[in-house]
Image: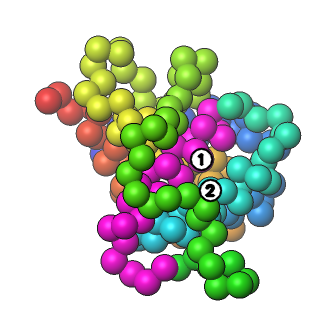
Amino acid sequence: MKEDMQELDEYTERLRPYTSAIDENSGHMIVSALIAYSTGLYDRTAGKCDEVIGRLEGEELPAAFTKALEILRHDAVSLVSSQTSVRSEFTIEGKSPLEVSMDADDTVKVPSFESGDHDLLAIRLPEGNIEVEWAFDRDNAIILLYAVGIISSPYDRPQLEERMQGFVLQKFQHYRTPV
């Protein structure tokens, strides 16, 4: 576990130079999306991802950052029907902000990282060693967004570490453990 923590800290520092365009409000929304995801508030996760994607549009950021938000959003939308709480995200008119169908749609392309994004990912495996591509991308997206949240929203760092650090470290452990 100590090795995983050190790897996470080194990864976070490796991302720091790429995060200057992310202001603290956007960082806070990223943290909010992650915490909502970890607590099963999938509609809120999707809504926060949409907000951050809109805020970061046009900023000079690596494409992997936006792709990570799209991956997390896609996974959250696919889980909304399993959400056990009442909807947690509404517009001022009382409507859901999700303008997408909650039914499975095989024609929707699952977002994934491109080959040019791989240098910014925490977990890198040879292509033949990846069992489930979408889960691998989702796990990398969570780790990337966690590191970006730690960097860009220092005020939220204690809450993010308390609620997500163990989950993120489990991801490192999972990919380190031989199957």
Q: Residue type at mark 2?
A: Cys
The residue under the point 28% across, 40% down is 173
Q: Amino acid at mark 1?
A: Leu
> Mark 2 = which residue?
49
Magenta stretch encompasses residue 68: yes
Tell me if residue 178 comes above or below residue 152 in the rendering: above
In-image side of 63 versus 127 (left or right): right
Q: Which residues are magenta?
A: 64-87
Please state the horizontal and vertical placement of residue 90, each as a whole percent of the image. 62, 79
Judged left or right of residue 146, residue 129 is: left
Q: Quadrant of the C terminus?
A: top left
| Pointer 1 residue | 69
**In the displayed structure, would residue 125 be above or below residue 36?**
above
Distance CA(mark 1)–CA(mark 2): 6 Å
Name the foreground residue: 86 vs 65: 86
Image coordinates for residue 136, horizontal then vertical, percent: 37, 34
